[in-house]
């Protein structure tokens, strides 16, 4: 048995071959489908062990949560690869394959070593994806790489502490070095204060890169958090705070991809709250929400990608093209919108219902309602620009067929899950014993949506206004500047004068003698 | 074990014959002579490394302990392995790359290698000094090869500092001889048990000081970037890969065999070594970020990597020694690859400043990819070899209670990414400028790609070199073992 990620990694290698364009498409579809099939037939409980250095590693370990994650990762991979193979270069397609492959391997890893290795491989491949994509993204890529590696190293330090304390690299709830794992996960999840990379990277990178990144980067963080740090109460409040911050920031954005990035922060908030409950229901709800979120957020990114592809920009004004010229995109967007808003019979509803059921603290329940309401309000703005507002934008070129196919795949899946949520449970054998379509859940699901429509109509002019996006204050840049200045001052001491060298040398000798003799 | 002595003789002989061939045949004989000798040397190296465990002693001329003794144990086996991996690629590379003073270059390179091999093999304190001087003086001469102002200046600084280091090593050697009446390492080590603690401490300080200059720990590092800047780049591969490492080897040999682990522990030298290492790499990383010249950047990065090695070796546990030694090997490979790639860029379009590298990523896709692999490896990201050795070092430091050192290594990893990424991003920035360039031939590309691929191979299958490295600590931590073999031989 092998990890499905291997298909992608092998695919990346095969793409090195000098094959024709058509063959590339076939190869890509073959590899992604094979990975999906492989994941589908994995049996929970399977594991592979491997001796490496002095450790016994478990590169593959399947259980229900990892199978669910793997399924949505491979399905999202299929959709996004089909979406982007026509429009990205082969070098970038290779990087995308490595990225998806590593993300999948992380989802099936059974020990901290494998987890860390592929976690960093994700960082490396995604950073190069951003760096190589265009000339305008060099600085963004640099920033993204550094901050992700900082998170990775924090996790690595946590791994060392955990290993030193328990003598075990197994993937389980962490006992030592929790703060460091928290920082690592916080960076991947883009908690408030650690979120600076997310809007920057997704806003600047080419749209197809944003599509791929948005599926995996934060979601791998969610998965790892569910494995290592479940049931930490304080994180639930942090997640809530993070989500509310996301709502505020999203309202101020003028660029749609940055708007969607902040909306990721909100949605991740749901998952954090679910995981932090620590109960089976909470974690299951969070994982289901991960599935749903990947589906609708990817479709939204894809739809915006189509807009960028056809009109050249991603301002809110440009969304107007959708309602008139792009029928497939419009339908997909509407379905995704109803999903993210948590309207019954669409996919976001089921996982939000599970999470709401799992939460029994009044403050958090209110927070969840507020988050749902905020999300609806935000996306009403999106819908308003896309379908209601008059627009004069014209179409530069038709979207590629492959883009629409990729988007369509995910949309169909969304509809299936929305109408028949129990199916998702049965595929993965996870039973949460909840009646999705009884009165209580339906009411609590539809309420925030209706409220938000009312409020939207009332305060429409404030919501759809184009705000001056505030210049973000970035602590990390300030720190980096300080460090570089220190380095500059240090380097000034080295001016090439031999007398100075000899002075340093003699003082070293004196210090050394003093240290050893006294 | 006859082969071991030929490891020193063969390069010396080759150097001699290259000199003669210059007089009589000009360039005709150079190529067959140099490559033939290098290939033969590779064969000799492999056969000696093969027999490095259990350690063997070879006494030249059957003089017993009075004469010159040569000893091969796994630690020297590792250094020989590095020569085996680096020497032939460098020679192949240089044959194409070096177009000025070709004969001098090869003569000096061979003498330098003979010196390094001698340092690695000898079991005699005075011979160690002699071979050290052989390798550092020829290394100085190689720095001056280009005879530009900068090169001469760099050589002068190198010479002054290196001589200062050698002076203290010689002083310590003489004092040791005066105190013990012998130069054989095993006998010294036995005799040292009666020497007062204070005197031994002073001796050790002199040894450490002398070797630390050669190794380039901050603040004794200043000569290193200056001398690297204008020297022929293939030489830099050998310099950072072998010359610096042989000094590390000699230092560790002297400390662990002569003084013994217990003495190091008692004097607190282990703590000093670890702290020194931490300070060195933190400063070196900060300084490396400031450089605009890639070669200087790599020089500072070498200083930082040597500091990681120092930490590994001074942690004082078995795991630490394994990690440190693995990093010695890995650093030689990674830095060699980086210098090779930069050398090719220099050869093709005389680019040595970071800004000159703009757009080369699209012009030399394979070479740039090699550069990326090697730099990610040296930063310490998985799945490359540098990650494994750093992992071992951090784990060992944490085990031995040096928590701050272990944590600083991770900070250092982050800092080193900042400047390597700067270079990488420049490589992949498009530029409109069209520059004339020479196409690098296969002779330049092959050695580069060979070393670059080792970065990946040793990262995925670290057990290949570790099977040799795992045996090193036995003969270092407990010097009785080494001594008894040497005396018995």
Image: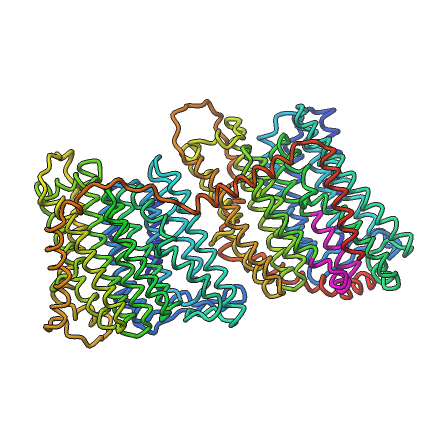
* Region in magenta: B246-271
B462 or A289: nearer the viewer: A289
Classify residue A57 as left or right of residue A418: right
Kindly identify the residue that appears in the image at 52 percent across and 37 percent down.
B341
Residue B254 covered by magenta stretch: yes
Instruction: Estimate the x, y position of residue B211 in percent, counting from the top left.
Output: 74, 47
Residue B109, located in which quarter of the rendered image? top right
Q: Is residue A31 visible?
A: no
Q: Quadrant of the N terminus of chain A?
A: bottom left
Residue B381 rendering spot, x and y as whole percentages? 48, 52
A37 up-or-down from B203: above or below = below
Q: How is the image coloured?
A: rainbow
Question: Which residue shows up at 71% across the image and 33% down it?
Answer: B107
- Please report the residue visible at 60 percent of the width from the left and 45 percent of the height from the top: B283
Q: Left or right: where does residue B163 sit relative to residue A443?
A: right
In this picture, is B29 found above or below A26? above
Q: Which is the main secondary structure of the residues drawn in magenta?
A: helix
Residue A419 is covered by the magenta coloring: no
Does residue A322 appear to the left or right of A236 in the view shown? left
């Amino acid at each position: 048995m092998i990890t499905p990620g291997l298909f992608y990694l092998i695919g990346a290698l095969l793409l090195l071959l000098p094959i024709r364009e058509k063959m590339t498409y076939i190869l890509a579809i073959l590899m992604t489908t094979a990975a999906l099939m492989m994941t589908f037939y994995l049996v929970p409980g399977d594991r592979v062990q491997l001796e490496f250095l002095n450790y016994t590693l478990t590169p593959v370990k399947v259980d229900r949560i990892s199978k669910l994650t793997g399924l949505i990762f491979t399905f999202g991979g299929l959709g996004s690869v089909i979406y982007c193979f026509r429009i990205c270069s082969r070098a970038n397609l290779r990087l995308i394959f490595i990225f998806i492959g590593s993300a999948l391997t992380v989802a099936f890893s059974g020990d901290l070593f494998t987890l860390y290795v592929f976690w960093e491989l994700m960082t490396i491949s995604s950073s190069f994806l951003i760096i190589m994509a265009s000339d305008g993204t060099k600085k963004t890529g640099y920033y993204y790489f550094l901050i992700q590696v900082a998170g990775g190293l924090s996790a690595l330090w946590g791994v060392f502490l955990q290993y030193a304390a328990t003598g075990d690299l197994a993937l389980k709830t962490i006992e030592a070095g929790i703060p460091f794992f928290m920082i690592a996960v916080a960076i991947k999840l883009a908690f408030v204060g650690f979120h600076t990379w997310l809007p920057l990277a997704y806003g600047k990178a080419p749209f197809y890169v944003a599509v791929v990144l948005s599926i995996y980067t934060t979601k791998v963080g969610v998965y790892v958090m569910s494995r290592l740090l479940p049931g930490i109460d304080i994180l639930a409040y942090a997640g809530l705070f993070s989500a509310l911050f996301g709502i505020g920031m999203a309202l101020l954005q003028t660029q749609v991809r940055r708007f969607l990035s902040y909306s990721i922060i909100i949605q991740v908030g749901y998952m954090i709250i679910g995981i932090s409950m620590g109960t089976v229901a909470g974690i299951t709800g969070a994982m289901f929400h991960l599935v749903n979120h990947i589906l609708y957020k990817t479709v939204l990114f894809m739809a915006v990608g189509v807009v960028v592809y056809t009109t050249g920009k991603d301002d809110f004004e440009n969304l107007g093209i959708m309602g008139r010229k792009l029928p497939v995109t419009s339908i997909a967007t509407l379905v995704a919108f109803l999903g993210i808003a948590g309207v019954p019979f669409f996919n976001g509803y089921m996982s939000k219902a599970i999470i709401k059921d799992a939460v029994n603290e009044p403050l958090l329940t209110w927070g969840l309602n507020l988050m749902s309401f905020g999300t609806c309000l935000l996306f009403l703005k999106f819908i308003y620009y896309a379908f209601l507002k008059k627009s004069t934008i014209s179409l530069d070129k038709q979207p590629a067929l492959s883009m629409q196919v990729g988007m369509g795949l995910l949309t169909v899946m969304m509809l299936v899950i929305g109408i028949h949520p129990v199916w998702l449970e049965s595929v993965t054998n996870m039973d949460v014993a909840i009646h999705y379509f009884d009165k209580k859940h339906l009411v609590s699901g539809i309420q925030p949506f209706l409220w938000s429509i009312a409020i939207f109509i009332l305060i429409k002019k404030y919501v759809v206004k184009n705000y001056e996006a505030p210049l973000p204050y970035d602590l990390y840049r300030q720190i980096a500047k300080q460090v570089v200045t220190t380095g500059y001052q240090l380097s000034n001491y080295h001016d090439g004068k031999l007398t100075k060298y000899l002075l340093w040398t003699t003082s070293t000798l004196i210090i050394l003698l003093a240290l050893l003799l006294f | 074990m006859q082969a071991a002595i030929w490891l020193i003789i063969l390069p010396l002989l080759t150097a001699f014959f290259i000199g003669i061939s210059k007089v009589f045949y000009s360039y005709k004989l150079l190529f067959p002579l140099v490559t033939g000798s290098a290939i033969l040397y590779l064969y000799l190296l492999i056969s000696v490394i093969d027999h490095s465990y259990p350690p063997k002693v070879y006494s030249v001329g059957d003089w017993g302990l009075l004469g010159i003794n040569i000893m091969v144990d796994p630690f020297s086996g590792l250094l020989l392995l590095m020569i085996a991996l680096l020497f032939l690629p460098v020679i192949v590379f240089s044959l194409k790359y070096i177009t000025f003073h070709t004969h001098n270059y090869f003569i000096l390179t061979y003498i330098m290698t003979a010196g390094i091999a001698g340092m690695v093999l000898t079991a005699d304190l005075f011979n160690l000094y002699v071979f050290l001087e052989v390798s550092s003086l020829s290394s100085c001469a190689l720095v001056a090869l280009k005879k530009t102002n900068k090169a001469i200046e760099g050589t002068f600084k190198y010479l002054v500092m290196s001589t200062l280091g050698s002076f203290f090593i010689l002083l310590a050697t003489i004092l040791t001889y005066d105190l013990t009446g012998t130069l054989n390492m095993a006998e010294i080590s036995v005799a040292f048990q009666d020497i007062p603690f204070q005197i031994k401490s002073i001796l050790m300080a002199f040894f450490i000081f002398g070797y630390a200059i050669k190794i380039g720990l901050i603040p004794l590092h200043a000569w290193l970037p200056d001398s690297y800047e204008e020297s022929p780049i293939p030489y830099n591969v050998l310099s950072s890969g072998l010359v610096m490492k042989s000094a590390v080897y000699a230092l560790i040999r002297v400390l662990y065999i002569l003084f013994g682990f217990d003495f190091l522990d008692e004097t607190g030298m282990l703590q000093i070594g670890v702290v020194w290492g931490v300070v060195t790499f933190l400063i070196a990383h900060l300084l490396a970020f400031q450089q605009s010249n890639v070669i200087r950047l790599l020089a500072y990065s070498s200083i930082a990597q040597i500091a990681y090695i120092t930490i590994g070796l001074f942690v004082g546990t078995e795991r630490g020694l394994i990690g440190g030694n693995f990093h010695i090997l890995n650093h030689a490979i990674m830095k060699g690859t980086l210098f090779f790639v930069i050398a090719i860029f220099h050869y093709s379009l005389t680019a040595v400043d970071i800004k000159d590298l703009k757009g080369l990523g699209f012009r030399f896709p394979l070479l740039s990819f090699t550069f990326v692999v090697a730099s990610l490896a040296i930063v310490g990201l998985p799945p490359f070899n540098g990650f494994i050795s750093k992992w071992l070092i951090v784990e060992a430091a944490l085990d031995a209670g040096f928590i701050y050192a272990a944590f600083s290594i991770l900070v250092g990893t982050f800092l080193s990414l900042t400047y390597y990424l700067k270079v990488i991003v420049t490589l992949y920035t498009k530029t409109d400028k069209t520059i004339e360039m020479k196409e690098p031939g296969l002779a330049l590309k092959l050695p580069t790609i060979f070393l670059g691929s080792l970065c990946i191979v040793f990262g995925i299958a670290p057990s290949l070199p570790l099977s040799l490295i795992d045996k090193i600590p036995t003969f270092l931590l407990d010097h009785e073992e080494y001594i008894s073999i040497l005396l018995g031989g």
